Image: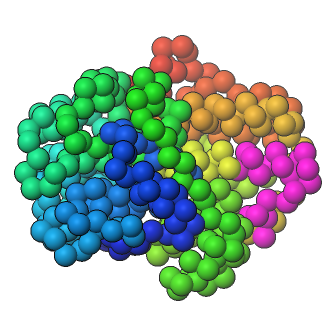
Amino acid sequence: MSASPVSSPFGIFPWLASVWQQTINGADSLHHGLLLTGIDGIGKREFAISLSRRLLCADPAVEGACGRCQNCFLFDAGTHPDLHILATEAETASERNSSLAVYSDRYQDITARQKRANPARVIPVDQVRLLIERFYQSAHISSHKVAIIVPADRMNANAANALLKLLEEPPENSHFILVSTYPGLLPATIRSRCIAIALTAPDLNQGAIWLQSRGVESPSQLMQEHPGEGPVDLFIRWRCGDLELQRDHLKQLVGLLAGKVDPVALAANLCKSDVTMVLVLLQRFCVSLAKWQGANVAPPWISLTGLVKQHISAPALQALYERTGQYRRMARDQLNAQLALEELLLGLVALATSGHRDPAPPRSAAGKPLSGSARGRIVRATR
């Protein structure tokens, strides 16, 4: 996928303007550790990039960096020596943010990444160790050093422990900007050493106006069809064609409930997509069904599928939702997506069939219940 820049270095999205102002007002006494949180697709990465650009600028203004000094020139060229970005290979390879991709390449083995069938979705300890080595050196050009870690919750245990030491004893004039949609996945010790900055999501009107300015047709309808997703990610996925893929996945899930789709075959098909995206989609599918059952609120995707209302108990849907969330956390490591999705989809079939039972126990591709040791193979931790 080609780079999809969604904001200029000066660009702060309208719905983040007040948070930006509050942050900049306290820039002179800014804590060395910041944790940017908020739902997907609202501009957390772009906020982090803009903030780091301002921190490194020699003559910053309220609205951002000056854009004229040597620091700004090097920053925009992707060669500033005092900006460090740690990211997963998947984040870098996606080129979601061009600045992020360029700087995070410094901390990755590009040749090894290109040879892998699937880029790694974990930030390993080696990246943090290299960051520590470089951060204890003097700043090269700016009076500050800045590190961005995104997604911070994708650090494995050893990486998080190594970073903790750096947060406890930060070098002078250093700043760490952690970006996370799921801050609860970070160790409490990491969170306690950072100041959390909650980035607010836009309302429907703000998001629709921004999407329309980007050339998206029927932006209000698009946002209503994808509740819980920010306009930035919606724009990127619209531009890359991923929204059509998600619609296809939804239709397959509906077919599964109707008994028209084989769960094992569907799991194999879903494995071809980003596993985290699929698990998020499955959780939202559960939430939509629960709202339909409990509050008679028809799902936003009903116009695409024509699904007949299912009689599934809310506690059972909640159990499936939580189990899916467990696998999302496991996805930080090397998740066996095929086995995990087979379990979840077989569980969804069981709910639709019985109307009240908890999700089915894990099963193999042949349909047999998995033993305890086999279930343990669903996730293979890489530390």
Q: Residue furthest top?
A: 372
Which residue is located at x 66 percent, y 24 percent? 361
Looking at the image, residue 171 lies above or below residue 376: below
* The quarter of the displayed image where residue 120 is located: top left
Residue 34 visible, this angle: yes
Which residue is located at x 77 percent, y 27 percent? 358
Residue closest to the eye, 232 or 262? 232
Looking at the image, residue 284 lies above or below residue 245: above
Instruction: Let me know if residue 292 is in the magenta part.
Output: yes
Q: Residue 132: horizontal and vertical position, in percent?
A: 17, 33
Q: How is the image coloured?
A: rainbow
Residue 259 visible, this angle: no
Side (left or right) of 223 relative to 154: right
Q: Residue 26: horizontal and vertical position, in percent?
A: 42, 51
The quadrant of the image that shows the C terminus is: top left
Looking at the image, residue 51 lies above or below residue 146: below
| Start-end of magenta stretch | 285-303
Side (left or right) of 333 relative to 183: left
Which residue is located at x 62 percent, y 65 percent? 202
Which residue is located at x 64 percent, y 73 percent? 206
